[in-house]
Amino acid sequence: MAAGPLIVQSDKTLLLEVDHDDYEACRNAIAPFAELERSPEHVHTYRLTNLGLWNARAAGHDAEQVVDALMTYSRFPVPNALLIDVAETMARYGRLTLNVHPSWGLILSTTQPHILSEVLHSKKIMPLLGDQIDEATVRVHPSERGRLKQVLVQLGWPAEDLAGYVDGEHHDMTLAADDWEMRTYQEQAVAGFLAGGSGVVVLPCGAGKTIVGAGAMTAVAATTLILVTNTVAARQWKAELLKRTSLTEEEVGEYSGVRKEIRPVTIATYQVLTTRRKGVYTHLDLFDARDWGLIIYDEVHLLPAPVFRFTADIQSRRRLGLTATLIREDGLEKDVFSLIGPKRYDAPWREIEAQGWIAPAHCTEVRVTLSDTEAATYAISEPEDRYRFAAHAPAKARVVKKLLERHPDEQALVIGQYIDQLEELAAELDLPLVTGKTPVRERERLFQAFRDGTQQALVVSKVANFSVDLPEAALAIQVSGTFGSRQEEAQRLGRLLRPKHDGRTAHFYTVITRDTVDATFAAKRQRFLAEQGYAYDIVDADDLLYGSGSVTPLD
């Protein structure tokens, strides 16, 4: 029997050989429960974490499946202690349960009293609880349902919330599916959410997360509050709901910096909810404006901390988080797990691509080199200034121009982090620039012109990272990013993943400056996409610009 591609180590790291014949099968088997940490060329490093194992457990994977995957693909015998630890960690999820008792109200209970005894010794727990009923049951203050779940996750005893949800204000709506139908994975995602009552659905960009939201809304049939990243996203959600459901214009409201409409279905932006006046979040009362039956958090990985805090108080409402990646660069994945809910459904990007629902994509990293003078300046720069300097390498502009010439017929996005860099590129390429300062009306006009094909290319800042539907975008060139943000890399590739009318492959280029922090951050950003099965071809900028070597990967 051939040696497997995986080396399982006792410190919970998993080393996966990329060139092995069983690489893809192994990657798909461990993806539901292991997190990719590093992805150099030949060996990828994953790690088993408590949160990853608990999310897998909540999504329906049991310890036996995890152990079987590790043993099936491991090159060497798996440390027995690790297998025991995996089983015990996954068994911790649900040993404590939140429920509603007809006489005692909201309770925390267990079938193993010593566990309850352990958590009751925590000083953080006591203020959240009421009287202890017996050795296995304690009352919970209803207002502390969310905060209790947060603390229990921190203590390593994640509670399964079976306390149910209020129905909210009933509101009839149906899917208007005369000329389309939900895809199988979308139906499975809705079913997974409904079975759990609250939680997160993870789907690739372009795979129809809005349809999943609409499916959940029509199943719950109640007033719904939808939280989105910006006004453009709000209007895209509204247009999609009007197209895909029986909802009318009068039933769907926008609550943003421009409009303040509260209707049976209300779409609000994170920005307006986190607006403060004299230190007070003046719009958080939107959560109480109606008897909401469902709250949807679009791009839940971007949920601002103030909204998390308020979400702790609305645990009796059904909550659906939608995202392409559960990665949060601020480390608040545990709050997503405890306050929005665990992962209920997750579809690998490559699996959805293989079914033809998202476009195939080719990723290429183009490496530019600083001149001797530029390298000397970089070397003496302050550490906090080095990334900006490296990201602004003059050679990047030449590479962008050359890549646009190589793909003359493609709808293209040039994406970056630094506004001054983008202004220079827009001027040099004679292209429109879209940033956070671009008025919403002008932003929508440019995006619509891009969709229509009357505007072939745009230079865009991070405002285009999220919830912007540009289905014919087939070329993206990234010149700078938010340091090592994995979520941003995934979202930027996601701009290209809407299936093309002719089935062609999309191209994602990231232009980086070698031997600088730009290259270090790029390696970190690429980790999530590597986990999804995307490999980056490496090309030297001189080969591209001057034809001194092979540039086959670019074609």
Image: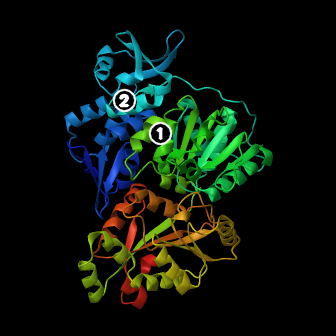
As drawn, which residue projects farthest toward the front?
A: 278
Q: How many marks?
A: 2
Q: Which mark is residue 319?
A: none
Query: Residue 389 sits in which quadrant?
Result: bottom left
Position in image of residue 158 (x %, y %): 38, 30
| Colour pattern | rainbow
Mark 2 lies on residue = 152
Q: Residue at x 41, y 24 (%)?
A: 128
Residue 413 in the figure: left or right of residue 49: right
Mark 1 closeness class: few <14, some 14–19, many ≥20 residues within 10 Å: some
Position in image of residue 434 (x %, y %): 58, 71
Front-lying residue, 535 or 226: 226
Mark 2 closeness class: few <14, some 14–19, many ≥20 residues within 10 Å: some
Does residue 504 lie above or below 66 as drawn? below
Position in image of residue 121 (x %, y %): 28, 21
Residue type highlighted by circle 1:
Arg
Query: Residue 222 sits in which quadrant?
Result: top right
Q: Which mark is residue 309?
A: 1
Q: Earlier in the sequence, mark 1 or mark 2?
A: 2
